[in-house]
Amino acid sequence: MFERLKVQSGSGGPAVLSVLLRAFLFLLPTGLMLVASLRHPGPNRLMLWLGTGLQVGLCLPTLLSRASWRQPVGPSLITLYLIALAWLWWGDGRDDWYTHLTKSVLMVVPLGVFAFQTLTESGAPAIRRARMLAERLAARRDWPQDLAACRALPEVKALRAALTIDAAPALALLNHPRTEVRVAALAALEFRKDWRGGQAELVLQAAQYAEQPIVRAAAVSALANVDDRPLIEAVAQFLHDPSWEVRKAATESLLWDTEHRWAWIRYTVRRVLADPLYQNDCALCHNGELLSAEAVNDLTGWCAEKGVLAVRAALTLGVHYNRALAERPDEAPVQALRRQLEDAHTPAVLRIELGRLLQHHQELDPPLLEKLLDSSNPAPLRLTAVETLLTEHADGPLQGAAVAALRDLARLPNREIALATADVIQRRLGVDLGLGLGQPLPPIHSRQAAEVTRRVMRWAVAQDNPEDLEDSRVVVQR
Protein backbone atom coordinates (compact mmCIF):
# COMPACT_ATOMS: atom_id res chain seq x y z
CA MET A 1 0.00 0.00 0.00
CA PHE A 2 2.79 2.39 0.87
CA GLU A 3 5.05 1.77 -2.13
CA ARG A 4 3.72 4.92 -3.86
CA LEU A 5 4.59 7.03 -0.81
CA LYS A 6 8.17 5.79 -0.54
CA VAL A 7 11.00 7.99 -1.72
CA GLN A 8 14.44 6.48 -1.48
CA SER A 9 16.79 8.56 0.62
CA GLY A 10 20.55 8.65 0.35
CA SER A 11 20.90 5.70 2.73
CA GLY A 12 18.31 3.65 0.85
CA GLY A 13 15.65 3.68 3.62
CA PRO A 14 12.00 4.76 3.33
CA ALA A 15 11.13 8.42 3.51
CA VAL A 16 10.03 10.05 6.75
CA LEU A 17 6.51 10.54 5.40
CA SER A 18 6.08 6.83 4.78
CA VAL A 19 7.37 5.97 8.27
CA LEU A 20 5.07 8.46 9.97
CA LEU A 21 2.02 7.39 7.97
CA ARG A 22 2.63 3.72 8.70
CA ALA A 23 3.14 4.36 12.41
CA PHE A 24 0.00 6.52 12.58
CA LEU A 25 -2.21 3.88 10.96
CA PHE A 26 -0.88 1.12 13.21
CA LEU A 27 -1.25 3.19 16.41
CA LEU A 28 -4.66 4.66 15.56
CA PRO A 29 -6.71 1.68 16.92
CA THR A 30 -4.71 1.78 20.13
CA GLY A 31 -5.39 5.50 20.54
CA LEU A 32 -9.09 5.07 19.90
CA MET A 33 -9.31 2.20 22.40
CA LEU A 34 -7.38 4.26 24.97
CA VAL A 35 -9.78 7.22 24.72
CA ALA A 36 -12.77 4.85 24.92
CA SER A 37 -11.32 3.29 28.07
CA LEU A 38 -10.82 6.67 29.70
CA ARG A 39 -14.36 7.82 28.84
CA HIS A 40 -16.17 4.61 29.93
CA PRO A 41 -17.49 4.81 33.54
CA GLY A 42 -19.26 1.47 33.61
CA PRO A 43 -18.29 -2.06 34.65
CA ASN A 44 -16.89 -2.84 31.16
CA ARG A 45 -14.08 -0.36 31.65
CA LEU A 46 -11.67 -3.17 32.61
CA MET A 47 -12.45 -5.03 29.38
CA LEU A 48 -11.69 -1.89 27.37
CA TRP A 49 -8.35 -1.51 29.14
CA LEU A 50 -7.53 -5.14 28.36
CA GLY A 51 -8.39 -4.45 24.72
CA THR A 52 -6.11 -1.42 24.73
CA GLY A 53 -3.29 -3.49 26.15
CA LEU A 54 -3.88 -6.13 23.49
CA GLN A 55 -3.63 -3.49 20.77
CA VAL A 56 -0.33 -2.27 22.20
CA GLY A 57 0.99 -5.81 22.32
CA LEU A 58 0.02 -6.41 18.71
CA CYS A 59 1.15 -3.19 17.02
CA LEU A 60 4.42 -2.44 18.80
CA PRO A 61 6.24 -5.67 17.73
CA THR A 62 5.09 -5.00 14.17
CA LEU A 63 6.46 -1.47 14.21
CA LEU A 64 9.74 -2.43 15.89
CA SER A 65 10.48 -5.46 13.67
CA ARG A 66 12.63 -4.77 10.60
CA ALA A 67 11.22 -7.77 8.80
CA SER A 68 7.69 -6.37 8.98
CA TRP A 69 8.77 -3.21 7.14
CA ARG A 70 9.74 -5.31 4.13
CA GLN A 71 6.38 -7.13 3.98
CA PRO A 72 2.94 -5.95 2.78
CA VAL A 73 1.09 -4.21 5.61
CA GLY A 74 -2.44 -4.83 4.34
CA PRO A 75 -3.23 -8.15 6.10
CA SER A 76 -1.76 -7.17 9.46
CA LEU A 77 -3.38 -3.72 9.38
CA ILE A 78 -6.82 -5.15 8.54
CA THR A 79 -6.49 -7.74 11.32
CA LEU A 80 -5.50 -5.10 13.85
CA TYR A 81 -8.48 -2.87 13.03
CA LEU A 82 -11.01 -5.69 13.02
CA ILE A 83 -9.82 -6.92 16.43
CA ALA A 84 -10.23 -3.40 17.84
CA LEU A 85 -13.68 -3.08 16.24
CA ALA A 86 -14.87 -6.41 17.67
CA TRP A 87 -13.51 -5.57 21.14
CA LEU A 88 -15.12 -2.14 21.14
CA TRP A 89 -18.42 -3.55 19.90
CA TRP A 90 -18.42 -6.09 22.70
CA GLY A 91 -16.93 -3.98 25.53
CA ASP A 92 -18.47 -0.56 24.95
CA GLY A 93 -22.25 -0.50 25.01
CA ARG A 94 -22.62 3.24 25.14
CA ASP A 95 -24.69 5.03 22.52
CA ASP A 96 -22.87 8.34 22.02
CA TRP A 97 -21.08 10.21 19.27
CA TYR A 98 -17.57 8.97 20.13
CA THR A 99 -18.54 5.31 20.09
CA HIS A 100 -20.18 5.67 16.67
CA LEU A 101 -17.22 7.66 15.33
CA THR A 102 -14.72 5.10 16.62
CA LYS A 103 -16.62 2.18 15.15
CA SER A 104 -16.90 4.01 11.82
CA VAL A 105 -13.16 4.68 11.68
CA LEU A 106 -12.32 1.10 12.65
CA MET A 107 -14.58 -0.15 9.86
CA VAL A 108 -13.79 2.34 7.07
CA VAL A 109 -9.97 2.15 7.30
CA PRO A 110 -9.68 -1.65 6.82
CA LEU A 111 -12.28 -1.49 4.05
CA GLY A 112 -10.22 1.19 2.32
CA VAL A 113 -7.02 -0.82 2.74
CA PHE A 114 -8.73 -3.93 1.37
CA ALA A 115 -10.13 -1.99 -1.59
CA PHE A 116 -6.73 -0.51 -2.38
CA GLN A 117 -5.05 -3.92 -2.13
CA THR A 118 -7.68 -5.49 -4.37
CA LEU A 119 -7.29 -2.70 -6.91
CA THR A 120 -3.52 -3.07 -6.91
CA GLU A 121 -3.61 -6.85 -7.32
CA SER A 122 -6.09 -6.52 -10.18
CA GLY A 123 -3.38 -4.75 -12.18
CA ALA A 124 -5.47 -1.68 -12.94
CA PRO A 125 -2.85 0.82 -11.72
CA ALA A 126 -0.13 -0.90 -13.73
CA ILE A 127 -2.30 -0.94 -16.85
CA ARG A 128 -3.17 2.73 -16.36
CA ARG A 129 0.49 3.58 -15.98
CA ALA A 130 1.32 1.56 -19.12
CA ARG A 131 -1.32 3.45 -21.09
CA MET A 132 0.04 6.78 -19.92
CA LEU A 133 3.58 5.75 -20.91
CA ALA A 134 2.33 4.52 -24.29
CA GLU A 135 0.59 7.85 -24.92
CA ARG A 136 3.74 9.71 -23.92
CA LEU A 137 5.76 7.53 -26.30
CA ALA A 138 3.32 8.21 -29.14
CA ALA A 139 3.66 11.96 -28.55
CA ARG A 140 7.47 11.91 -28.57
CA ARG A 141 9.12 13.91 -31.33
CA ASP A 142 12.83 13.53 -30.62
CA TRP A 143 14.00 10.09 -31.81
CA PRO A 144 17.52 8.70 -32.31
CA GLN A 145 18.73 8.43 -35.88
CA ASP A 146 19.45 4.74 -35.40
CA LEU A 147 16.05 3.29 -34.56
CA ALA A 148 17.70 0.17 -33.19
CA ALA A 149 18.73 2.35 -30.24
CA CYS A 150 15.07 2.83 -29.29
CA ARG A 151 15.25 -0.12 -26.92
CA ALA A 152 17.62 1.86 -24.72
CA LEU A 153 15.33 4.87 -24.36
CA PRO A 154 14.14 5.51 -20.77
CA GLU A 155 10.52 5.71 -21.94
CA VAL A 156 10.79 2.30 -23.62
CA LYS A 157 12.36 0.74 -20.52
CA ALA A 158 9.62 2.21 -18.34
CA LEU A 159 6.92 0.92 -20.70
CA ARG A 160 8.51 -2.54 -20.75
CA ALA A 161 8.41 -2.64 -16.95
CA ALA A 162 4.78 -1.49 -16.89
CA LEU A 163 3.63 -4.20 -19.35
CA THR A 164 4.02 -7.06 -16.88
CA ILE A 165 0.27 -7.71 -16.74
CA ASP A 166 -1.01 -6.90 -20.22
CA ALA A 167 0.65 -6.03 -23.52
CA ALA A 168 -2.42 -4.20 -24.86
CA PRO A 169 -1.09 -0.62 -24.32
CA ALA A 170 1.93 -1.37 -26.52
CA LEU A 171 -0.10 -3.33 -29.08
CA ALA A 172 -2.32 -0.29 -29.56
CA LEU A 173 0.70 1.52 -31.02
CA LEU A 174 1.36 -1.05 -33.76
CA ASN A 175 -0.94 0.84 -36.16
CA HIS A 176 0.65 4.20 -35.45
CA PRO A 177 1.64 6.02 -38.66
CA ARG A 178 5.15 6.80 -37.40
CA THR A 179 7.74 4.07 -37.76
CA GLU A 180 9.63 5.24 -34.68
CA VAL A 181 6.60 4.72 -32.44
CA ARG A 182 5.98 1.20 -33.78
CA VAL A 183 9.61 0.23 -33.30
CA ALA A 184 9.61 1.58 -29.74
CA ALA A 185 6.39 -0.29 -28.90
CA LEU A 186 7.80 -3.54 -30.24
CA ALA A 187 11.07 -2.94 -28.40
CA ALA A 188 9.06 -2.71 -25.17
CA LEU A 189 7.67 -6.18 -25.98
CA GLU A 190 11.08 -7.71 -26.74
CA PHE A 191 11.38 -11.34 -25.55
CA ARG A 192 7.97 -11.13 -23.85
CA LYS A 193 6.79 -14.47 -22.48
CA ASP A 194 3.22 -13.91 -21.27
CA TRP A 195 0.76 -13.21 -24.09
CA ARG A 196 -3.00 -13.16 -23.97
CA GLY A 197 -5.06 -14.82 -26.66
CA GLY A 198 -4.42 -13.32 -30.08
CA GLN A 199 -1.78 -10.81 -28.97
CA ALA A 200 1.22 -12.73 -30.32
CA GLU A 201 -0.64 -13.18 -33.60
CA LEU A 202 -1.04 -9.40 -33.84
CA VAL A 203 2.71 -8.94 -33.50
CA LEU A 204 3.32 -11.63 -36.12
CA GLN A 205 0.89 -9.89 -38.47
CA ALA A 206 2.73 -6.61 -37.92
CA ALA A 207 5.98 -8.34 -38.88
CA GLN A 208 4.51 -9.93 -41.99
CA TYR A 209 2.98 -6.73 -43.37
CA ALA A 210 5.64 -4.20 -42.34
CA GLU A 211 7.64 -2.69 -45.18
CA GLN A 212 10.47 -1.37 -42.99
CA PRO A 213 13.09 -3.99 -42.03
CA ILE A 214 13.58 -2.38 -38.61
CA VAL A 215 9.90 -2.97 -37.78
CA ARG A 216 10.06 -6.60 -38.92
CA ALA A 217 13.20 -7.17 -36.87
CA ALA A 218 11.66 -5.63 -33.76
CA ALA A 219 8.49 -7.72 -34.16
CA VAL A 220 10.49 -10.92 -34.57
CA SER A 221 12.46 -10.11 -31.41
CA ALA A 222 9.21 -9.55 -29.54
CA LEU A 223 8.13 -13.11 -30.42
CA ALA A 224 11.38 -14.71 -29.28
CA ASN A 225 9.87 -16.20 -26.12
CA VAL A 226 6.66 -17.75 -27.45
CA ASP A 227 6.14 -21.48 -27.00
CA ASP A 228 3.51 -22.09 -29.66
CA ARG A 229 4.80 -24.26 -32.51
CA PRO A 230 2.85 -22.56 -35.35
CA LEU A 231 4.17 -19.19 -34.20
CA ILE A 232 7.73 -20.50 -33.99
CA GLU A 233 7.47 -21.96 -37.48
CA ALA A 234 6.08 -18.65 -38.74
CA VAL A 235 8.97 -16.75 -37.16
CA ALA A 236 11.40 -19.20 -38.79
CA GLN A 237 10.24 -18.00 -42.20
CA PHE A 238 11.94 -14.68 -41.49
CA LEU A 239 15.27 -16.48 -41.84
CA HIS A 240 14.58 -16.01 -45.58
CA ASP A 241 13.90 -12.27 -45.25
CA PRO A 242 15.69 -10.06 -47.80
CA SER A 243 17.09 -7.89 -44.99
CA TRP A 244 20.14 -9.11 -43.07
CA GLU A 245 18.88 -7.21 -40.02
CA VAL A 246 15.67 -9.25 -39.97
CA ARG A 247 17.50 -12.54 -40.57
CA LYS A 248 19.81 -11.73 -37.66
CA ALA A 249 16.85 -11.00 -35.38
CA ALA A 250 15.16 -14.23 -36.44
CA THR A 251 18.34 -16.19 -35.72
CA GLU A 252 18.56 -14.68 -32.23
CA SER A 253 14.88 -15.35 -31.58
CA LEU A 254 14.97 -18.99 -32.69
CA LEU A 255 18.33 -20.47 -31.74
CA TRP A 256 18.49 -19.34 -28.11
CA ASP A 257 16.38 -22.39 -27.12
CA THR A 258 17.15 -25.21 -29.55
CA GLU A 259 16.62 -27.73 -26.75
CA HIS A 260 12.86 -27.40 -27.26
CA ARG A 261 12.54 -25.82 -30.71
CA TRP A 262 15.03 -27.57 -32.95
CA ALA A 263 12.57 -30.19 -34.20
CA TRP A 264 10.24 -27.36 -35.31
CA ILE A 265 12.83 -25.28 -37.18
CA ARG A 266 15.53 -27.72 -38.37
CA TYR A 267 14.25 -28.02 -41.96
CA THR A 268 13.90 -24.26 -42.32
CA VAL A 269 17.41 -23.77 -40.94
CA ARG A 270 18.76 -26.33 -43.40
CA ARG A 271 17.14 -24.57 -46.38
CA VAL A 272 18.54 -21.24 -45.26
CA LEU A 273 22.05 -22.61 -44.80
CA ALA A 274 21.91 -24.21 -48.26
CA ASP A 275 20.55 -21.12 -50.03
CA PRO A 276 23.30 -19.37 -52.08
CA LEU A 277 21.49 -16.04 -51.62
CA TYR A 278 22.55 -15.96 -47.97
CA GLN A 279 26.01 -17.46 -48.20
CA ASN A 280 27.60 -14.14 -47.19
CA ASP A 281 25.81 -14.39 -43.81
CA CYS A 282 28.33 -17.11 -42.90
CA ALA A 283 27.62 -18.66 -39.49
CA LEU A 284 24.32 -18.52 -37.62
CA CYS A 285 25.33 -16.62 -34.48
CA HIS A 286 23.20 -16.04 -31.40
CA ASN A 287 23.71 -14.95 -27.80
CA GLY A 288 21.39 -17.42 -26.06
CA GLU A 289 22.00 -20.91 -24.79
CA LEU A 290 24.42 -23.23 -26.57
CA LEU A 291 23.06 -25.40 -29.34
CA SER A 292 21.43 -28.64 -28.25
CA ALA A 293 23.04 -32.01 -28.92
CA GLU A 294 20.40 -32.73 -31.58
CA ALA A 295 21.22 -29.50 -33.39
CA VAL A 296 24.95 -30.20 -33.22
CA ASN A 297 24.42 -33.69 -34.66
CA ASP A 298 22.35 -32.32 -37.55
CA LEU A 299 24.88 -29.60 -38.34
CA THR A 300 27.70 -32.15 -38.25
CA GLY A 301 25.81 -34.31 -40.73
CA TRP A 302 25.18 -31.30 -43.00
CA CYS A 303 28.92 -30.66 -43.12
CA ALA A 304 29.19 -33.80 -45.26
CA GLU A 305 26.90 -32.24 -47.88
CA LYS A 306 28.11 -30.18 -50.82
CA GLY A 307 28.20 -26.48 -51.48
CA VAL A 308 27.12 -23.62 -49.26
CA LEU A 309 25.32 -25.87 -46.78
CA ALA A 310 28.51 -27.64 -45.69
CA VAL A 311 30.50 -24.43 -45.34
CA ARG A 312 27.90 -22.53 -43.33
CA ALA A 313 27.12 -25.56 -41.14
CA ALA A 314 30.83 -25.88 -40.31
CA LEU A 315 31.10 -22.16 -39.55
CA THR A 316 28.06 -22.38 -37.28
CA LEU A 317 29.58 -25.32 -35.43
CA GLY A 318 32.81 -23.37 -35.12
CA VAL A 319 30.98 -20.52 -33.41
CA HIS A 320 29.20 -23.00 -31.14
CA TYR A 321 32.39 -24.81 -30.11
CA ASN A 322 34.20 -21.51 -29.62
CA ARG A 323 31.55 -20.37 -27.15
CA ALA A 324 31.59 -23.76 -25.44
CA LEU A 325 35.36 -23.60 -24.90
CA ALA A 326 35.18 -19.99 -23.70
CA GLU A 327 32.25 -20.48 -21.32
CA ARG A 328 33.06 -23.96 -20.03
CA PRO A 329 36.81 -24.45 -19.95
CA ASP A 330 37.22 -28.19 -19.53
CA GLU A 331 39.57 -30.83 -20.85
CA ALA A 332 36.83 -33.26 -21.90
CA PRO A 333 35.39 -31.04 -24.71
CA VAL A 334 38.90 -30.29 -25.94
CA GLN A 335 39.74 -33.98 -26.16
CA ALA A 336 36.49 -34.66 -28.01
CA LEU A 337 37.28 -31.93 -30.55
CA ARG A 338 40.81 -33.27 -31.00
CA ARG A 339 39.48 -36.75 -31.73
CA GLN A 340 37.00 -35.31 -34.19
CA LEU A 341 39.75 -33.32 -35.88
CA GLU A 342 42.05 -36.32 -36.11
CA ASP A 343 39.35 -38.62 -37.50
CA ALA A 344 39.69 -38.87 -41.27
CA HIS A 345 35.96 -39.65 -41.55
CA THR A 346 35.04 -36.20 -40.23
CA PRO A 347 33.94 -33.94 -43.11
CA ALA A 348 36.90 -31.98 -44.45
CA VAL A 349 35.23 -28.58 -44.11
CA LEU A 350 34.51 -29.28 -40.44
CA ARG A 351 38.07 -30.50 -39.81
CA ILE A 352 39.41 -27.25 -41.26
CA GLU A 353 37.15 -25.21 -38.97
CA LEU A 354 38.07 -27.30 -35.93
CA GLY A 355 41.75 -26.89 -36.73
CA ARG A 356 41.42 -23.10 -36.77
CA LEU A 357 39.40 -23.18 -33.58
CA LEU A 358 41.85 -25.32 -31.63
CA GLN A 359 44.72 -23.24 -32.99
CA HIS A 360 43.02 -20.09 -31.68
CA HIS A 361 42.65 -21.65 -28.23
CA GLN A 362 46.21 -23.10 -28.37
CA GLU A 363 44.94 -26.65 -27.92
CA LEU A 364 46.91 -28.31 -30.78
CA ASP A 365 49.63 -30.48 -29.22
CA PRO A 366 52.74 -31.67 -31.16
CA PRO A 367 51.57 -35.30 -31.67
CA LEU A 368 48.34 -34.10 -33.26
CA LEU A 369 50.17 -31.47 -35.31
CA GLU A 370 52.53 -34.12 -36.68
CA LYS A 371 49.55 -36.13 -37.90
CA LEU A 372 47.99 -33.07 -39.48
CA LEU A 373 51.13 -32.45 -41.56
CA ASP A 374 50.44 -35.60 -43.56
CA SER A 375 49.61 -35.03 -47.23
CA SER A 376 46.34 -36.96 -46.86
CA ASN A 377 44.86 -34.06 -44.89
CA PRO A 378 43.16 -31.05 -46.53
CA ALA A 379 45.60 -28.32 -47.56
CA PRO A 380 44.11 -25.60 -45.29
CA LEU A 381 44.36 -27.96 -42.32
CA ARG A 382 47.99 -28.75 -43.11
CA LEU A 383 48.68 -25.03 -43.40
CA THR A 384 47.14 -24.47 -39.96
CA ALA A 385 49.39 -27.17 -38.52
CA VAL A 386 52.46 -25.65 -40.20
CA GLU A 387 51.75 -22.17 -38.87
CA THR A 388 51.13 -23.50 -35.37
CA LEU A 389 54.43 -25.39 -35.38
CA LEU A 390 56.40 -22.42 -36.69
CA THR A 391 54.75 -20.12 -34.13
CA GLU A 392 54.49 -22.15 -30.94
CA HIS A 393 57.10 -24.90 -31.51
CA ALA A 394 59.79 -23.14 -33.56
CA ASP A 395 62.58 -24.91 -31.66
CA GLY A 396 60.93 -28.31 -31.70
CA PRO A 397 61.91 -31.39 -33.69
CA LEU A 398 58.99 -30.90 -36.10
CA GLN A 399 60.32 -27.66 -37.58
CA GLY A 400 61.88 -29.40 -40.58
CA ALA A 401 58.71 -31.38 -41.24
CA ALA A 402 56.69 -28.16 -41.05
CA VAL A 403 58.91 -26.41 -43.63
CA ALA A 404 58.75 -29.49 -45.88
CA ALA A 405 54.95 -29.48 -45.69
CA LEU A 406 54.96 -25.77 -46.45
CA ARG A 407 57.06 -26.44 -49.55
CA ASP A 408 54.55 -29.08 -50.68
CA LEU A 409 51.70 -26.65 -50.21
CA ALA A 410 53.54 -23.98 -52.21
CA ARG A 411 53.64 -26.29 -55.23
CA LEU A 412 49.88 -26.93 -55.30
CA PRO A 413 48.17 -25.52 -58.43
CA ASN A 414 45.63 -23.53 -56.46
CA ARG A 415 45.94 -19.77 -56.28
CA GLU A 416 43.88 -19.47 -53.07
CA ILE A 417 46.11 -22.00 -51.30
CA ALA A 418 49.17 -20.31 -52.77
CA LEU A 419 48.17 -16.92 -51.32
CA ALA A 420 47.51 -18.42 -47.89
CA THR A 421 50.84 -20.25 -48.06
CA ALA A 422 52.66 -17.07 -49.09
CA ASP A 423 51.14 -15.30 -46.10
CA VAL A 424 52.52 -17.95 -43.72
CA ILE A 425 55.94 -17.96 -45.43
CA GLN A 426 56.26 -14.20 -45.26
CA ARG A 427 55.02 -13.82 -41.67
CA ARG A 428 56.67 -16.85 -40.10
CA LEU A 429 59.81 -17.42 -42.22
CA GLY A 430 60.72 -13.85 -43.08
CA VAL A 431 60.75 -14.36 -46.86
CA ASP A 432 59.45 -11.35 -48.80
CA LEU A 433 56.87 -12.57 -51.33
CA GLY A 434 55.27 -9.23 -52.18
CA LEU A 435 52.43 -9.15 -49.64
CA GLY A 436 51.74 -5.97 -47.71
CA LEU A 437 52.46 -6.15 -44.00
CA GLY A 438 49.23 -6.16 -42.04
CA GLN A 439 47.17 -5.97 -45.23
CA PRO A 440 44.50 -8.45 -46.35
CA LEU A 441 45.37 -10.92 -49.07
CA PRO A 442 44.88 -9.59 -52.60
CA PRO A 443 41.90 -10.75 -54.71
CA ILE A 444 42.51 -14.12 -56.29
CA HIS A 445 42.20 -12.86 -59.87
CA SER A 446 44.33 -9.75 -59.42
CA ARG A 447 47.81 -9.18 -60.89
CA GLN A 448 49.31 -9.05 -57.43
CA ALA A 449 47.86 -12.48 -56.63
CA ALA A 450 49.38 -13.91 -59.82
CA GLU A 451 52.79 -12.42 -58.99
CA VAL A 452 52.66 -13.71 -55.42
CA THR A 453 51.75 -17.17 -56.70
CA ARG A 454 54.81 -17.20 -59.02
CA ARG A 455 57.08 -16.12 -56.18
CA VAL A 456 55.73 -18.87 -53.94
CA MET A 457 56.44 -21.49 -56.57
CA ARG A 458 59.95 -20.12 -57.13
CA TRP A 459 60.52 -20.31 -53.37
CA ALA A 460 59.46 -23.97 -53.40
CA VAL A 461 61.78 -24.75 -56.35
CA ALA A 462 64.65 -22.97 -54.60
CA GLN A 463 64.12 -25.16 -51.56
CA ASP A 464 64.34 -28.24 -53.78
CA ASN A 465 67.65 -27.17 -55.44
CA PRO A 466 70.66 -27.41 -53.06
CA GLU A 467 72.71 -24.92 -55.07
CA ASP A 468 70.03 -22.27 -54.61
CA LEU A 469 69.29 -23.10 -51.02
CA GLU A 470 71.71 -20.55 -49.59
CA ASP A 471 70.05 -17.76 -51.54
CA SER A 472 66.62 -18.70 -50.21
CA ARG A 473 67.66 -19.44 -46.66
CA VAL A 474 64.81 -19.77 -44.18
CA VAL A 475 64.96 -17.42 -41.27
CA VAL A 476 62.51 -18.48 -38.58
CA GLN A 477 61.00 -15.56 -36.71
CA ARG A 478 60.76 -16.28 -33.07
Image (cartoon, rainbow, N blue to C red):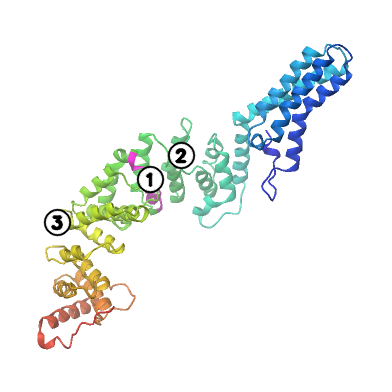
Apparent side of residue 129 relative to residue 446 in the rendered image (left or right):
right
Of the residues under marks 3 and 2, which one precedes in the sequence?
2
Examine the rendering and report whether any part of residue 318 can be seen: yes
Dot 3 corresponds to which residue? Answer: 344
Q: Which amino acid does label 2 sit on?
A: Val
Q: Where is residue 396 in the image (x, y as percent from the top left)?
A: 21, 73
Q: Position of residue 42 (x, y in %)?
A: 87, 12
Of the residues under marks 2 and 1, which one precedes in the sequence?
2
Label 2 neighbour load within 10 Å: few <14, some 14-19, many 20+: many
Of the residues under marks 3 and 1, which one precedes in the sequence?
1
Dot 1 corresponds to which residue? Answer: 256
Q: Does the magenta stretch include residue 246?
A: yes
Residue 394 appears in which quarter of the rendering?
Answer: bottom left
Label 3 neighbour load within 10 Å: few <14, some 14-19, many 20+: few
Dot 2 corresponds to which residue? Answer: 203
Residue 348 appears in which quarter of the rendering?
Answer: bottom left
Q: What residue type is labelled 3?
A: Ala
